Amino acid sequence: MECLQENNIRHCNCSYGSCERKGKCCLCISYHRKSRELPACFFYDDYERTYDRSLDNFLKMVGKVGMRTE
């Protein structure tokens, strides 16, 4: 399967500037899954900028903001 990095990068909200997986969703998901984390794209920007990719942080975000859209 061909990676659509150019298309993915437009929607990637990861603020970690030196990430080698930016726009490479399959690599990003695999990397975070090993650490029992979620990728940046699962988080709203204000939560993403904390670099806390834990499931607990995700659940905290969802509990506080409900299903808001950005």
Image: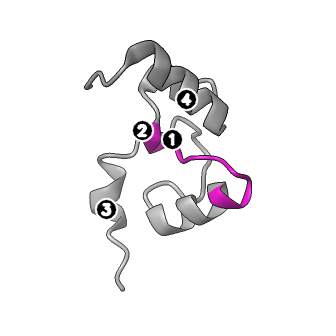
Query: Residue 53: in sight, yes or no?
Result: no
Query: Residue 38: in sight, yes or no?
Result: yes
Mark earlier in primary sequence (1, 2): 2
Magenta span contains residue 38: yes
Does the CB distance between marks 1 and 2 fall below 8 Å? yes
Residue name at image x 39 percent, y 46 percent: 12
Q: Mark 3 belongs to which amino acid?
A: Glu
Mark earlier in primary sequence (4, 1): 1
Q: For the N terminus, which image quadrant?
A: bottom left
Instruction: Tell me which segment is drawn in magenta.
Output: 33-42
Q: Based on the displayed image, in which of its 4 quarters is residue 44 positioned? A: top left
Return the x and y of residue 53 as percentages of the image width and height. Answer: 63, 38
SS type, badge 3: helix
| Residue at mark 3 | 6
Return the x and y of residue 15 as percentages of the image width and height. Answer: 52, 35
For residue 13, which numbered disc appears in the image? Answer: 2
Q: For the C terminus, which image quadrant?
A: top left
Mark earlier in primary sequence (4, 3): 3
Q: Mark 2 belongs to which amino acid?
A: Asn
| Residue at mark 4 | 59
Disc number lying in front (4 or 1): 4
Residue name at image x 47 percent, y 13 percent: 64
Does the CB distance between marks 4 and 3 fall below 8 Å? no
Q: Based on the displayed image, in which of its 4 quarters is residue 51 positioned? A: top right
Mark earlier in primary sequence (3, 2): 3
